[in-house]
Image (spheres, helix red, strand yellow):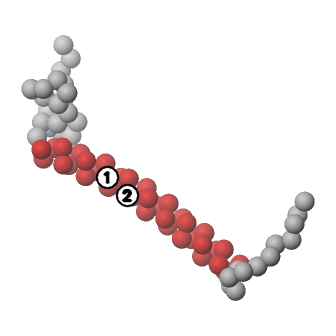
């Protein structure tokens, strides 16, 4: 049988077959790190969107414009 290990600290697991973490502390740490990485991704996307809006606003200072049809 394959040895099961904690997803956070890699210590050997005992008990329930579907157990993923050795303790509540490891479970909290793992979930907080996962949540933080998702928040970093969202933050990076928001930063790009903010920059895009600033660039678009600089080309359109009065807030409304028309663009000629190209084709
Ligand atoms: Zn652990």
Q: Position of residue 55 (x, y in %)?
A: 64, 74
15 left or right of 59 in image: left
Q: Quadrant of residue 6?
A: top left
- Residue 51 in sight here: yes
Respond yes or no on whether mark 2 lies under 8 Å from ligand 1. no
At 17% from the left edge and 30% from the top edge, which residue is drawn? 19
Q: Residues within 10 Å of mark 1 (few under 14, many from 20)?
A: few
Q: Is residue 42 above or below residue 67?
A: above
Q: Nearer the viewer, residue 65 or 57?
A: 65
58 up-or-down from 1: above or below = below
- The tag on residue 35 is 1
Residue indicated by mark 2: 39
Which image quarter is the C terminus in? bottom right
Total of numbered circles in the picture?
A: 2
In percent of the image, x 18 and y 43: which residue is there?
Answer: 27
For marks 1 and 2, give the CA distance. 6 Å
Percent from the top left, x then y, of residue 48? Answer: 54, 65
Q: Is residue 61 above or below residue 50?
A: below
Mark 1, secondary structure of its residue: helix
> Looking at the image, which residue is at 12% across and 26% down?
16
| Quadrant housing residue 52 | bottom right
Q: Quadrant of residue 18?
A: top left
Q: Quadrant of ligand 1?
A: top left
Measuring from the top left, give residue 47's x and y in whole percent.
49, 67
- 12 or 59, which is in the foreground? 59
The crowd level at tag 2 (other Cα within 10 Å; few <14, some 14-19, many 20+) is few
Q: Are marks 1 and 2 in contact (CB under 8 Å)?
A: yes
Q: Is mark 1 within 8 Å of ligand 1?
A: no
Left-right relation of 52 to 59: left
The residue located at (65%, 78%) in the rendering is: 57
Which quarter of the image is occupied by the N terminus? top left
């Amino acid at each position: 049988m394959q040895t099961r290990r904690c997803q956070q600290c890699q210590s050997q697991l005992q008990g329930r077959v579907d157990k993923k973490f050795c303790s509540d502390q490891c479970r909290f740490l793992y979930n907080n790190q996962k949540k933080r990485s998702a928040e970093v991704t969202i933050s990076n996307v928001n930063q790009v969107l903010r920059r895009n809006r600033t660039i678009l606003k600089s080309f359109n200072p009065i807030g409304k414009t028309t663009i000629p049809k190209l084709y």
